[in-house]
Image: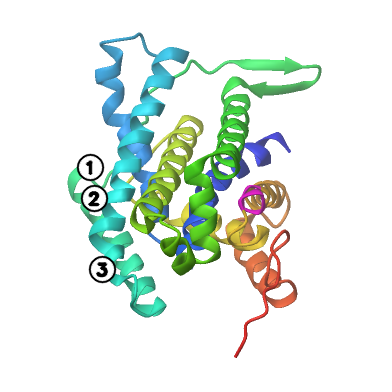
Amino acid sequence: MINGLAAGSVLALIALGYTMVYGVLRFINFAHGDVFMLGAFCAFYLAPGVAKLVPLPSVTGWLLVMVLSMALCALLGMLIERAVYKPLRRKPKLTVLITAIGVSLFIEYTGQWGFGASPKSPPELITETSIALGALSVTNTQVLVLGVTLFLLLALQFIVHRTRIGTAMRAVAFNPEAAALMGININVVISFTFGLGSALAAAGGILYAMSYPSIDPLMGILPGLKAFVAAVLGGIGNIPGAALGGLIIGIVETFVGGSAASTYRDAIAFAILILILLFKPAGLLGKSQVEKV
């Protein structure tokens, strides 16, 4: 269960970016999983420089690497939105979807050219130790993953529901034309949404790299697809739903991985996607909308 919650927390952080972008623009940014990969590589290349300022592994050094990587990926997310998606805002959704897939492939293969195709060992940001809870043994990394995810989810809820920019995001999601007429700068809100989602994906990439022995330029493909499934499962456009969907996918996958059906571990998420689209297409926490024709 703890392994599943830790894995699901990483998926939840990626799914939050999917659901926020969909809530504001009504399209799926399939390049989001690759921003997750870039977050891990930002940590890989920033760690040696940070180690010259503060000791690594340490909590202070890990926090500094995390903040810098999230900031860089937030800037990258805003750059992608301005350069690629903004000119397509009034184009058919299929055009934007195909473009998003193209951006994803561009990032992946540019990463193979720039970072190298061979897997790399992520830097040690925190010394991993085991914590004994009776007969149960957990690692401080697992506790950290759960704690950081919970903190970021609460921070996101605060931003969306208690700040001016969050109010603007909800207004744009509800009715962009009316929001523009009320003086809301649509471009700023959309850029902020992409930046915030990309920062969360970067955090997920770093937490993932802390738990797994290697990173590579294609590491974002499968987690990105699973996070999309998690967003649909929870209710696309619903922030708590995305977090819940990520946790459910992580837990189910972990239990399947420890069973006789372990070979189907990676397929179970897509089986869940088919079932949710068949029986509850709005998702667990989503609401069905009536479309006037």
Work out whether residue 253 or residue 160 is closer to the camera in this orientation and state it: 160
Work out whether residue 67 or residue 5 is closer to the camera in this orientation and state it: 67
162 in magenta = no
Determine the residue located farthest toward the bottom in the rendered image: 293
250 to 289, vertically: above or below: above
Q: Amino acid at mark 1?
A: Phe
Spatial CA span between label 2 and label 3: 27 Å
Question: Is label 2 in a helix, a strand or a loop?
Answer: helix
Give residue 112's mark.
Answer: 2
Q: Amino acid at mark 2?
A: Gln
Question: Is label 3 in a helix, a strand or a loop?
Answer: helix
In primary-sequence order, the first of circles 2 and 3 is 3
Determine which residue is flagged by label 1: 115
Question: Is label 1 in a helix, a strand or a loop?
Answer: helix
187 to 192, vertically: above or below: below
Predominant secondary structure in magenta? helix
Whether tag 3 and tag 1 are in contact, CB under 8 A, the answer is no
Position of residue 99 measured from the top left corner of the image (x, y, whole percent) = 31, 70
Whether tag 2 and tag 1 are in contact, CB under 8 A, the answer is yes
Determine the residue located farthest toward the right in the rendered image: 134
Question: In the image, what residue occupies the spot 54% across and 48% down?
Answer: 167
Position of residue 160 measured from the top left corner of the image (x, y, whole percent) = 56, 45
Question: In the image, what residue occupies the spot 72% across and 48% down?
Answer: 255
Image: magenta residue range: 239-243
Give residue 87's mark.
Answer: 3
Spatial CA span between label 3 and label 1: 29 Å
Question: In the image, what residue occupies the spot 58% across and 25% down?
Answer: 144
Q: Amino acid at mark 3?
A: Pro
84 to 205, vertically: above or below: below
Count of all numbered marks drawn on residues in the image: 3
In primary-sequence order, the first of circles 3 and 1 is 3
